[in-house]
Amino acid sequence: MGPTLGRDDVELIQRDTLYQGFFRLEALELRHRLFEGGWSATMRREVHNRFDAVGVLLTTRTVMPWYSSNSFALGQLTTRPPPGN
């Protein structure tokens, strides 16, 4: 297994709240450390925070087949750890 990256390997440059209501939509500008060394280019990602609500992604295989890819995931960066952890 290769090296793993954590929160210290992500630099959050800017965080903007685009919408605040039942859910929150944020725009993040960030960069992350690369496995081969150095840092990525700055990127902008939108994050949908639904707090304790349930979210469902409905799809039809004939219309939108499900696939997996290697990508940079923001979920853990924007999630606060539970109290006591």
Image (cartoon, grey):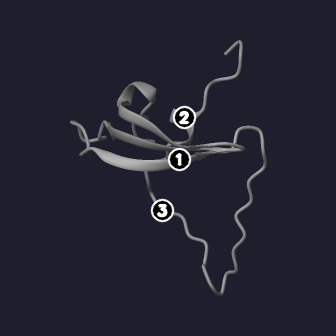
* Residue 33 coordinates in the image, percent (x, y): 31, 36
* Residue 62 coordinates in the image, percent (x, y): 65, 87
- In front of the other: label 1 or label 3? 1
Residue at 71 percent across and 16 percent down: it is 83
In this rendering, position of residue 40 left or right of residue 61: left
Q: Are marks 2 and 1 in contact (CB under 8 Å)?
A: yes
Q: Nearer the viewer, residue 46 or 1?
A: 46
The residue identified by callout 3 is 69
What amino acid is found at the position of numbered circle 1 in the picture? Answer: Val
Label annotation for residue 65 = none
Residue at 67 percent across and 16 percent down: it is 85
Please determine whether, in this image, residue 64 is positioned above or below residue 83: below
What amino acid is found at the position of numbered circle 3 in the picture? Answer: Ser
The residue identified by callout 2 is 78
The residue identified by callout 1 is 47
What amino acid is found at the position of numbered circle 2 in the picture? Answer: Thr
Residue 31 picture quarter? top left
- Label 2's element? helix
The quadrant the N terminus occupies is: top left
Dot placed on the residue nearer the N-terminal end, 2 or 3: 3
